[in-house]
Image (cartoon, rainbow, N blue to C red):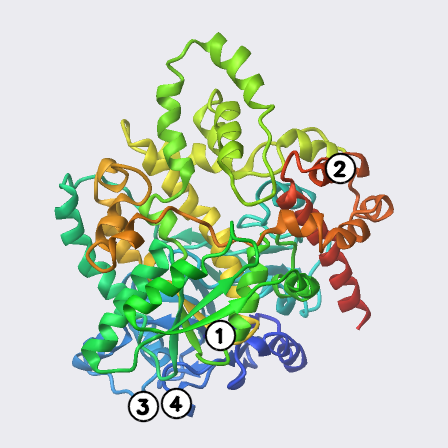
Amino acid sequence: MCGIAGSTRADEATLRLMRARLAHRGPDDEGLWRDGDAGLGLAHTRLAVIDLTPGGHQPMVSPCGRYVIAYNGEIYNYRELRADLAREGERFVSESDTEVLLRLLAREGTRALARLVGMFALALWDRDRRTLLLARDRLGIKPLVYAGLAGGGLAFASEIAALRAHPGIDGAIDRDALSAYLACLYVPAPFTIFRAIRKLPPGHLLRWQDGRLAIERYWRPRFSAERSLALDEAVEEILPTLRRAVVDRLVADVPVGCFLSGGIDSSVIAALMAAEARRRGDPPPRTFTMTFANTAYDERAAARAVAAHLGTRHTELAAEPALADRLEAMVTAFGEPFGNPTALLIDEISRLAREHVTVALVGDGGDEVFAGYPRYAGGLLARRYRRLPRALRERLIAPLAARLPDGVAGRHGLRRAREFLTAANLPDAEMYAAWVEYFSPEERGRLLGEPAPGRPIARLYREIAGAAPEGADPLDTMQKTDLDSFLPGNLLAYGDAMSMRHALELRLPLIDHRLIEAVARLRGPVRFLNGQKTLLRAAARRLLPPSVARRPKRGFNPPIGLWLRRDLSALAEEYLGPATLAELGLDPAPVARLLAEHRRGGRDHGLKLWALIVIEAWRRSAARARAA
């Protein structure tokens, strides 16, 4: 795991500055390489995980001298690829996956991407053709941002902060991106908060040559529903792929652990890790759980039970409101506003886990792949709900539902009922977006003093639905929308930014592309037969006690609503005062109404308020960076 940066017009001082801003991603080694004739330069910082010797140093030049690579990530099947290349005559001088990746790309070009199992963001320079290739892994686990330079040049980096160290990149704010942030609590790809900087979307590659830039998608999940199996048959088919996904992610020359919540996703991963440790005769894996004082959020009892059953070496780590003290450090790591407060938890658990391990497996992606979100049930139920008379739904049920209260204690049943009943009358795309977006178009319009904008997730949903074959299962569209947006833009973004702040590598078995493709071949009812995560729960029953397999979903979230009413109330006052909001170009009046309603406890606006606090924290962080 590493950090990369580069430019087609890079002097050495600029490369060094960009590299310095990525030092936290790779504290074990660093490197620079420049093609003086072409003006291109690459920078790299290294977290040594595979081949701890200097043999993994980057940027790495091919034996023929034609190709140079700077790469961030892990290729889990590099040993098989290495064996294939050796049979074709390649001779290797290191044990690193970087050398295997470089040789494979040199031989096969972009066709090599289809053979990779892993996570990566890479830059490959072809000295003969003077062509730069950038590529990002299929699901977007590893980040990559880029910006155009005057005269057709290009600069790129793993993080926005490193890219902004490059001269000539406009720092103007993209107001459309700010609006999208208020909707999603993250800025969805390909946008960033800056007009001049873009994210390379997951599963895409970028070619640059002589000032010309072309972007194309090389992979997307395809839900074919070609396999109609009984549930037990489906488990038999999926379980070996799931086991392989976990075992592949244990490849490392450093200690490996697991984040364990006690829920299905992480418990299955821990169970497969423990089984592999027993098979190899290794010590039991290390597991880590975050605990909360509020019982509605706390999962320590469930995690303890799983850890005891598996015999792991278990550690509990307490979360407190004081985590918010690191708010500005958090937004600095993202380089733009990021409003999901779970990032604070990942930051803290990564900091503490790094004292014990260098790599941790996590269960992110299980909900997207195995249909675990309540909104999937809502999307399927809405089609039946719409059979009720329109007048009953729109004139009676929806207005009554809009009055349903919800508290800040962490129980979301009434909120979900309200959201379902008020949005289920909308077209599918608008309905789905209403469930996953936070500030509505009308709220964003009032905040920004602009006409109400559209829903960014609704646009994506319509694109995906429009490309689906006739008669496609609506579950397919919902899952593909989340795999394209919520997963990379939210979960994977905070996982990478917060873990790499502490030089901890996170690995995600549940979004192994082979597993996604295997699940996507199954018909919808097998994936979602009797409720959330039907298939994964059935697999869990073969690995864990029945009580774990039956355990209801509980998200990994801090009690931000409670914190903002109590311990963080002063922070809200400071960051959301009228003068501050006016400086941000936001109307203070609707924010004051949100604060008042939240304090009364009738409605939980914690995430909306936190998202606004983050904007001010980001502004302060950016101001300090400019002054430094």
Q: Is residue 327 above or below residue 59?
A: above
Q: Residue at x 53, y 50 (%)?
A: 189
Amino acid type at circle 2 is: Ala
Quick one: label 1 or label 3, which is nearer the N terminus? 3
Residue that mark 1 sits on = 353
Q: Relative to 254, is 16 on the left or the right?
A: right
Q: Which of the labelled discs sits on residue 596, or is there none?
A: 2
The local crowd at label 1, few if under 14, some if 14 to 19, many if 20 or more residues have their Cα within 10 Å, is many
Disc nearest the viewer among 1 and 3 = 1
The local crowd at label 3, few if under 14, some if 14 to 19, many if 20 or more residues have their Cα within 10 Å, is few
Residue at the right extreme of this rendering: 579
Residue that mark 3 sits on = 93
Rendered image quadrant of residue 66: bottom left
Amino acid type at circle 1 is: Ala
Amino acid type at circle 3 is: Val
The local crowd at label 4, few if under 14, some if 14 to 19, many if 20 or more residues have their Cα within 10 Å, is some
Q: What element carries label 2?
A: helix
Mark 3 and mark 4: Cα distance apart in space: 7 Å
Q: Are marks 3 and 4 in contact (CB under 8 Å)?
A: yes
Disc nearest the viewer among 3 and 4 = 4
Q: What element carries label 1?
A: helix
Disc nearest the viewer among 2 and 4 = 2
Q: Are marks 2 and 3 in contact (CB under 8 Å)?
A: no
Percent of width and height locating residue 90: 24, 83
Quick one: label 2 or label 3, which is nearer the N terminus? 3
Mark 4 and mark 1: Cα distance apart in space: 27 Å
The local crowd at label 2, few if under 14, some if 14 to 19, many if 20 or more residues have their Cα within 10 Å, is some
Q: Relative to 210, is 78 on the left or the right?
A: left
Q: Nearer the viewer, residue 450 or 515?
A: 515
